[in-house]
């Protein structure tokens, strides 16, 4: 008995010690904290050797999981294509799942090939619908005698279903559907009160086909408004997985809603009548805009869009979710693009996923543009739809399709990736999903198999050499941003019904990521105003408002268990009565509910502590942590510097700083400000990012090292040599350079067209190392990443701005050898291929388009891209405090 008590007490003491120590260390890595990647299977022409090779590379470099999305094939490789969901395809999936399990990876899977959902089992009766109408002008007392079906061949609607016939004059509307005879003809004599316009209304077909489909996946796009069609579509997967339940992926995926023109449903009239109590057909002339954008049309558009949104959620999102759950799988869904309140669609799924598209114009010194690009659609106001829904609904994981069309092909650098990813992380994302990694066979020649809009985060890309640094960085940050709970300050009412009422034009309104500026310009500005005032914000939909409660300390509590300080309701003309009633009740219960037509004034009147960091231009996000404090992720995405004391908007006794780039950590200098909140000493340069962790108690850990003084730099100018460790084309020999030079200036024509790794070597004399606490190696303009060895010992790799590395402990007085292995981009190599006519564009569809959308282009027109060390290299003595 005494022995048992001793064991229990010992175990309790060990547990207590471990618990006490855990909060001051990095969080334990989970596979979900690592970045995942969309894995394009060209023609599904995969084999077990290639699958294992790719998966082992993913695991080695720090990828946490893959999402399988088959697409079109490779020219000349048709014999190796594997039809989607065939026996052989399922065997390859089984091999993938087995190998992923062995390597500790997760496997997700698209519920189709390409996008959107559709395929060979989608018959015209199951396919996406569109509204089709015909019009006739009929004078009074004249007879219309027209066949209603089939439709004329020039309309290209052989499967359209006739629904209604409506006659409209200036003063009357008559439903004349019953005048359609058994032979399908409409015979009707127009009464007095004309002239009349007769409308024939049909449920037509979009005949949209799956975009970028793989073999076995081509076909019509699914009717997402029809639950029966959706279930029939998913039955194909039931059959494929029967007896293979162990292969079912961790989650199923649906790409952005790109079901273009699908504005109708066979039962829309009935659904509309059910929702609104009147007949949409009776207002068809107003609905189609034949009387302009009248008040009646606004009402019809609002009600129609509300019904379309409901049946999309009920008949697709919920049906698909229930199906996945029946297989013990989750769903990951991109709601943007859908004709619905995307907040509610995001809140209905397991893993909401937003998307970054294009390149943001960051004002960060030393961050070069990396060639042609397109403007970014990834503003925080757009990214926050997914995270807002997740925060309010209690979904712990917020995903993002990351780096889509970031730059032109072969121009993507790791340095360019980091600020884009930081912006997403600051917007609530904690599950980065790269777009993407084309599968390539193990023996594929340069440049491997490619996907036209992919950043190519795969073993065939040159950035793969040092990509593990980026992956480790993301993993560390995401481990912090997955712990604890969200702690955003303010809820912003998202006026969905205002938007769908006032938005004229065509009746079909999609919340397309590329058109948010036009669809919701006010909302984007409201978010910017709130964040510039120092607050973080989540969107709030009408439905999510209904689930809010008020705590005893007057906070607003969401159904997901997260709390907020206030709700801001911007001035709008259309807001549901139920929403207004709920807002009044919340206010009566003590909640801070502010109605305002001036968002800047509204946030200033809240009386809620704001974050000085955010007001000063730092991008950031804050979460509650398990220690009773807060976790911060901060990133300087502009040309600004912080070096001094910064107040935080929280109470705390101590703060730790964690550097996700290097893994360093330590106790920050902190003090209590006059308002009772804590102030912390920070040093943050443009492009840098840090994690902060606050505690309500004192912690005993080593102190964070601050740079107190920088001495006179030692410029390393002369005595450099360059040799190529790896190069295509091969370049032998050693180049001795009097001064440091980027390698395309070397006296060999091959250096202007190669892709590879060059070793820069130099000896530098330091008379007295002890004059400083440490030394920083500033590599300046690196094209594109560099791994450094000092006196034969690894010092680390640099791949993000600023390109600086602490090398102090590796230096000694006297002669020191620096070896810098620099990896360049493959842009010069592919440009040479183009000029020489090498056939590398071997893909059947979207065969490597340009990011600029140019119809005719050649990568051979590119100017030579700098490679190697492109500026001064210097050693900087520093003294720490």
Image: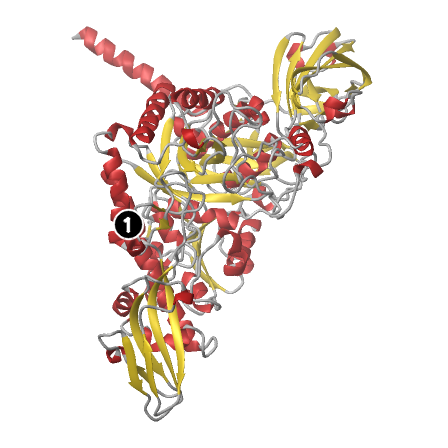
In the displayed structure, would residue 674 be above or below residue 441?
Answer: below
Q: Relative to 648, is 767 above or below?
A: above
Residue at 37% of width from left, 23% of height from top?
100
Which one is in front, 778 or 570?
778
Picture quadrant of residue 358:
top right
In the rendered image of this protein, does residue 791 appear above or below residue 379? above
Quadrant (top left, top right, bottom left, bottom right) of the N terminus = top left
Quadrant in the picture for residue 724: top right
Above or below: residue 112 compared with residue 716: below
Where residue 869 sits in the image (x, y, percent)? 72, 24
737 or 201: nearer the viewer? 201
The answer to whether any part of residue 664 appears in the image is: yes
The residue wearing badge 1 is 230
Where's residue 329, x and y in %? Answer: 29, 36
| Depth order, front residue of 785/177 | 177
Q: Let me know if residue 483 appears in the view.
A: no
Q: Quadrant of the C terminus?
A: top right
Q: Residues within 10 Å of mark 1 (few under 14, many from 20)?
A: many
* Residue 187 as seen in the image, left or right of residue 36: left
**Colour scheme employed for the rendering of this structure:** secondary structure
- Horizontal side of residue 343 vs 676, given as left or right: left
**Which residue is depicted at the point 42% across and 41% down?**
486
Where does the image place residue 67, in percent across and percent down from the top left? 40, 34
In the rendered image, residue 365, in percent from the top left (x then y), is placed at: 70, 36
Residue furthest left as drawn: 1
Q: Which residue is drawn at the image coordinates 61% and 46% (left, top)?
A: 374
Count of number-bearing discs: 1
**SS type, badge 1:** helix
């Amino acid at each position: 008995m005494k022995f048992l008590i001793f064991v229990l007490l010992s175990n309790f003491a060990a547990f207590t010690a471990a618990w006490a120590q855990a909060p001051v260390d990095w969080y334990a890595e989970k596979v979900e904290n690592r970045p995942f990647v969309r894995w394009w299977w060209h023609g599904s022409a995969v084999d077990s050797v290639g699958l294992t090779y790719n998966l082992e590379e993913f695991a080695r470099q720090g990828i946490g999981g893959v999402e399988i999305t088959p697409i079109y094939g490779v020219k000349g490789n048709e014999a190796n294509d594997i039809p989607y969901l065939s026996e052989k395809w399922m065997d390859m999936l089984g091999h993938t799942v087995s190998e992923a399990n062995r390597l500790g990876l997760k496997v997700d899977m698209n519920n189709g090939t390409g996008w959107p959902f559709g395929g060979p089992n989608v018959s015209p009766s199951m396919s996406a619908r569109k509204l089709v109408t015909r019009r006739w002008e009929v004078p009074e007392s004249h007879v219309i005698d027209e066949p209603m079906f089939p439709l004329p061949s020039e309309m290209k609607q052989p499967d359209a279903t006739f629904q209604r016939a409506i006659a409209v004059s200036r003063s009357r509307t008559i439903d004349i559907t019953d005048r359609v005879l058994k032979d399908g003809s409409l015979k009707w004599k127009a009464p007095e009160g004309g002239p009349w316009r007769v409308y024939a209304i049909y449920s037509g077909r979009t005949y949209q086909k799956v975009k970028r489909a793989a073999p076995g996946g081509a076909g019509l796009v699914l009717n997402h408004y029809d639950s029966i069609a959706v279930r029939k579509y998913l039955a194909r997967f039931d059959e494929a997985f029967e007896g293979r339940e162990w292969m079912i992926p961790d989650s199923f995926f649906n790409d952005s809603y790109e079901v273009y023109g699908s504005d109708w449903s066979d039962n829309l009239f009935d659904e509309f009548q059910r929702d609104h109590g009147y007949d949409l057909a009776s207002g068809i002339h107003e609905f189609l805009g034949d009387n302009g954008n009248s008040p009646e049309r606004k009402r019809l558009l609002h009600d129609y869009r509300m019904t379309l949104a409901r049946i999309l959620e009920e008949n697709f999102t919920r049906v698909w979710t229930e199906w996945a759950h029946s297989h013990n799988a989750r769903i990951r869904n991109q709601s943007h693009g859908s004709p619905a309140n995307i907040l509610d669609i995001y809140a209905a799924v397991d893993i909401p996923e937003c998307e970054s598209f294009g390149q943001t114009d960051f004002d960060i010194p030393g961050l070069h543009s990396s060639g042609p690009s397109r403007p970014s659609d990834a503003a925080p106001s757009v990214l926050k739809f997914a995270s807002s829904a997740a925060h309010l609904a209690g979904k712990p994981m917020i995903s993002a399709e990351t780096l889509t069309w970031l730059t032109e092909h072969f121009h993507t650098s790791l340095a360019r990736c980091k600020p884009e990813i930081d912006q997403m992380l600051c917007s609530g994302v904690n599950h980065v999903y790269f777009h993407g990694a084309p599968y390539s066979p193990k023996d594929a020649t340069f440049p491997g198999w490619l996907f036209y809009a992919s950043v190519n985060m795969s073993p065939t890309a040159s950035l793969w050499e040092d990509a593990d640094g980026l992956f480790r960085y993301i993993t560390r940050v995401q481990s912090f941003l997955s712990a604890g709970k969200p702690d955003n300050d303010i809820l912003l009412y998202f006026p969905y019904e205002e938007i769908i009422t006032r938005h004229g034009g065509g009746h079909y309104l999609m919340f397309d990521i590329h058109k948010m500026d036009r669809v919701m310009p006010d909302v984007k500005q409201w978010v910017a105003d709130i964040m510039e005032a120092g607050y973080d914000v989540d969107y709030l939909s009408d439905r999510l408002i209904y689930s809010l409660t008020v705590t005893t300390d007057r906070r607003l509590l969401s159904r997901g268990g997260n709390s907020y300080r206030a709700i801001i309701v911007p001035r709008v003309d259309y807001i549901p009565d139920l929403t207004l009633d709920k807002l009044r009740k919340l206010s009566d219960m003590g909640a801070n509910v502010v109605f305002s037509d001036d968002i800047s004034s509204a946030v200033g009147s809240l009386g809620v502590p704001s974050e000085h960091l955010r007001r000063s231009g730092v991008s950031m996000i804050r979460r509650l942590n398990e220690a009773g404090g807060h976790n911060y992720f901060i990133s300087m995405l502009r040309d600004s510097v912080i070096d001094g004391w910064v107040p935080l908007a929280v109470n705390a006794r101590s703060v730790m700083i964690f550097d996700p780039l290097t893994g360093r950590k330590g106790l920050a200098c902190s003090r209590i400000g006059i308002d009772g909140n804590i102030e912390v000493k920070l040093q943050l340069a443009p492009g840098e990012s840090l994690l902060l962790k606050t505690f309500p108690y004192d912690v005993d850990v080593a102190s964070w090292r601050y740079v107190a003084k920088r001495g006179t730099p030692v410029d390393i100018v002369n005595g450099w040599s360059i040799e190529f460790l790896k190069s295509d084309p091969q370049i032998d020999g050693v180049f001795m350079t009097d001064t440091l030079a980027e390698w395309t200036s070397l006296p060999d024509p091959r250096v202007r067209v190669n892709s590879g790794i060059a070793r820069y070597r130099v000896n530098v004399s330091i008379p007295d190392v002890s004059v400083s606490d440490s030394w920083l190696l500033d590599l300046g303009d690196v094209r594109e990443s560099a791994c450094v060895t000092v006196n034969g010992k690894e010092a680390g790799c640099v791949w993000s701005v600023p390109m600086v590395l602490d090398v102090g402990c590796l230096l000694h007085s006297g002669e020191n050898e620096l070896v810098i292995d620099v990896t360049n981009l493959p842009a010069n190599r592919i440009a040479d291929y183009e000029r020489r006519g090498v056939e590398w564009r071997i893909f059947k569809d979207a065969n490597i388009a340009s990011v600029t959308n140019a119809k005719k282009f050649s990568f051979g027109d590119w100017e030579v891209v700098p490679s190697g060390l492109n500026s001064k290299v210097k050693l900087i003595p520093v003294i720490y405090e």
